[in-house]
Amino acid sequence: MIKSYKARRVIANTFIYILLGGLGLIWVSPLVYLVLHSFRGEGLAYVSYLIPKQLSFDNYKALFTVTADSSVDFPRWFLNTFIIAIFSCIISTLAVLMVSYAFSRLRFKARKPLINVGMILGMFPGFMTMIAIYYLLKALGTAIPLFTNPQFELIICYSAGAGLGYQISKGFFDTIPRALDEAATIDGATRNQIFWKIILPMSKPILVYTILTSFIGPWTDFILAKIIVGVDPPNYTVAIGLQAMIQSDMVVNNFKKFLAGSVCVAVPITILFMLMQRYYVEGVTAGGVKG
Amino acid sequence: MKFIDYVQLNPFQKFWYNFKKFFKALPSNIVKFFVAIGNFFKKIGLGIGRGFAGYFSRFIKGDWATKLSYVVMGFSNIVRGQIIKGLLFLAVEVGFIFFMIGFGAEKIYNLGFFNNGKVGFVETYEGVNERGNPVTIHGDVSMVLLLYGVMTIIIIGVFFVCYIASTKSAYKAEQMQAAGEKLPTFRQEIKAFGDEKFHVTLMAFPSLTISIFTIMPLIFMILTAFTNYDHDHLVELFSWHGFKTFGDVFNSTSQAQMSTTFLELTKWTLIWAVLATVVNYILGMIVALMINKKGIKLKALWRTLFVVTVAVPQFVSLLLMSQMLDVNGGAINVLLKDVLHVSGNYIDFLGGENYWVARITVLVVNVWVGIPYTILITSGILMNIPADLYESATIDGAGPVRSFFSITLPYMLFVTTPYLITTFIGNINNFNVIYLLTNGKQGSNDLYGGASHTDLLVTWLFKLTMDKKDYNYAAAIGILVFIVCATVSLLTFNLTKSAKNEEEFS
């Protein structure tokens, strides 16, 4: 029996430090492995040791030099994804803000039913509609040539349903006192002006959160892109491209390039996420957790 | 039982009491749930009835111009000086008529009302061309026709809404004129869209895109569940066959493979969803408590170590994991065999004979993916638990385990029920973890549609559409998943008090 309270606390804390250290190691080690082996000079896909023997930039160089006969065109995939992300980010941010502002601050007859419809639509598994969307886009493509461009199709797909993700920013708008709106209305402001001049400037956290999530979305989406883009390598986004690189017939030659490519995608996204971490937690707890 | 009695119970009795209370209340809650659904439909029915009553009473009360507007949309507005508005209504009507003549009527006609439920008329067949060579003569494609049919029905619906709005506007214009008021000019009406009608402006664009790219495909897929659009009817025309698809999914005699697959995967989906949710929730909370414990230094460092895994795009970390678990020398096998010498040969974590190995591996990887999320979400709330609760528990002799189960867990459960439900639903639909880790690694001959024992219902749905092309079964399974998710969330949201106090702050 340890008598002193202090000694007991020290032992407890040491135990916690050891546990946290061990767990932390388990949690980051795959990522350390990813970064370390993306610089590995020797060997093909798999090696029978964990620490690389030579470090070099060869994998990155190989990743960004495109040869004519190779189906791996990472710079092109990166550019594709970047364009898609920029456009769908702008459109979806606008859509989310418009819907959530209307649901949160304005009162109209169809409000409650529309909120319920939005909730119900969100409960259907997303994959159910994907194949129908694919054929719909094909049908539209026969009438409007723009709809045969995979980048454009993906932008449409990512931003069309964005309005359904209104819950989190609605939760945020709900917390802004209505007295502000009333005061502005008395001063003669229209609702349009209230939206742009009063509510938006006050909603920086949720604005940042919405912009970043909708920018990150296209980088991480995998399945919808795979269905829409099809099998033509120049149209791939990074997610499909990286997955294609480690299919069983290509993995031996491409594994190290896959690691390098993963690092190239993960680093910017990780930095963005770390920047918006605070907003992320605020957003999720405001929308999803209520006491 | 009064509150004072309740407080005196020990935790096990309290738990037992709450447990009994929950199940005692369950039947009445389920009844309430169905009553609520009934009321919902009653309300819709009454609304439609009232709408029609209004429609006819406006017609009876209105003057000749209003009556004529029921046929020529916008006529009353034009006569009374709102010329642009009236012309817009008229343009909508003319456009709709042209659309129906040139396109819509045929699409509705093709939907199968006139061909014994077959969608389309002309079958594709192997014929010969004028030079006598064999060639495929392309007929109707049912799938495209159904898609156009749904499109037409939605356009008819939109037109109907415009039509009702025009009759209302016609009657209103008449009444305002009769009362001697000045009718708003077109410019004033446009201005109203920045103020009283601002919601219309805001909602117009998102609802348009949502109806085209979410609602329409959804209606299309729901309808395919009631057809025989499977891999035998890709070229042939398919036809309506009611609830037979749903019957097949449950029928263990004629469709044995289908229904055993469904049963097997449903069991695994539920096991997966419960375990993935509960394990991540509790373990994540324990780690968060350790990080936030008083006297632990370098809190930011510990937090970052875990949170980095959330930040890395999920497909990257999952693809990486699937490579690290690879049987041909992935990093984890190297660690176990070549570095630590624990196991004699490389283990096939994801594709082994015994599918429980793969299932457990997937669950463990999901712990790696999921715990950081729980840490992120719960840290803030954990800090809000009053410290004196823990202090008094320590004085009363409770150890850390006891305080966790008697203080932390009940408190957190109370606050984060909505989050838990969303996570549970998210796990039922957790496509990424299963697909990116196990796709193609687990073969199975005893399950239908290329499904393996690690597949969830949603990944099976995906395989049914993409590989097997059984669109009707995929749609039926999607609907069943939806029913489960919707019931779970509606029941629990109604049970918890946290059901939306949205006006609280305003």
Image: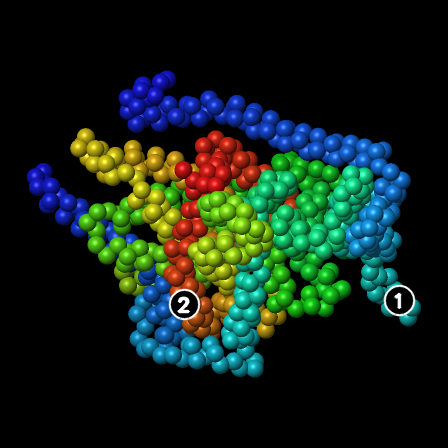
Left or right side of A224 for A6:
left
Number of disc labels: 2
Label 1: chain letter: B
Residue sitting at the far front: B180
Q: Residues within 10 Å of mark 1 (few under 14, many from 20)?
A: few
Quarter of the image with the N terminus of chain B is: top left
Q: Secondary structure at mark 1?
A: loop
Name the amino acid type tagged 1. Asn
Whole-percent x, y for residue B304 in the image = 32, 58
Name the amino acid type tagged 2. Val
Marks 2, 1: nearer the viewer: 2
- The residue shown at (65%, 48%) is B197
Whole-percent x, y for residue B218 in the image = 66, 48
Between A89 and A268, the one nearer to me in the picture:
A89
- The numbered disc on residue B129 is 1
Report which quarter residue B251 is drawn in.
top right
3D distance between C-alphas at marks 2 and 1? 59 Å
Label 2: chain letter: A
Between B322 and A84, the one nearer to me in the picture:
A84
Return the residue at label 2. Answer: A267
Report which quarter residue B317 is drawn in.
bottom left
